[in-house]
Image: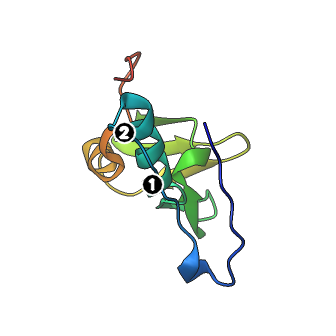
Amino acid sequence: MRVTEKLVNSPEEEGVTLEYIRLTKDFEEIKEYVRHKGDTLTGYRQTKEKVSVRIEDVLYFETVDGLVFAYTVDSVYEIKGRLYQVEEKLNNHLCRNACKRT
């Protein structure tokens, strides 16, 4: 498969072009990855400091006593709201327990 790169001058010019004969599962996954790359959730450290947490950095979510926590490699963040609300924001990028990606 051919890969073409082009250096641009500003973030507004950044983008990805997919060229395909038909939209296969592989291309669909690439499209969804690019579309959601850099998406963030608002999280709170134990000190109550508000931070942006990149979704791709989250390893898993956990609920304890009605609170939602996002775990990264080196931190834990409280996410305001309910787990179903986090699921809605993440669309199909979150699955509960052991699930298969389709």
| Dot placed on the residue nearer the N-terminal end, 2 or 1 | 2
Residue 93, picture quadrant? top left
Secondary-structure class at tag 2: loop
Three-letter code, disc 1: His
| Looking at the image, residue 89 lies above or below residue 27 | below
The residue wearing badge 2 is 21
Q: CA distance from mark 2 to mark 1?
A: 23 Å
- Report crowding for label 2: few under 14, some 14 to 19, many 20 or more residues within 10 A (C-alpha): few
Left or right of residue 33: residue 96: left
| Looking at the image, residue 93 lies above or below residue 38 | above
Place of residue 73 in the rendered image (x, y in percent of width and height, measured from the top left) = 71, 39
Q: Residue at x 41, y 15 (%)?
A: 98
Mark 2 vs mark 1, foreground winner is 2
Place of residue 3 in the rendered image (x, y in percent of width and height, measured from the top left) = 65, 48
Left or right of residue 51: residue 98: left
Left or right of residue 15: residue 27: left
- Give residue 36's mark: 1
Residue 6, picture quadrant? bottom right
Three-letter code, disc 2: Ile
Place of residue 39 in the rendered image (x, y in percent of width and height, measured from the top left) = 48, 59
Residue 26, picture quadrant? top left
In what quadrant of the picture does the N terminus appear? top right
Q: Nearer the viewer, residue 10 or 63?
A: 10
- Report crowding for label 1: few under 14, some 14 to 19, many 20 or more residues within 10 A (C-alpha): some
Place of residue 35 in the rendered image (x, y in percent of width and height, measured from the top left) = 43, 56
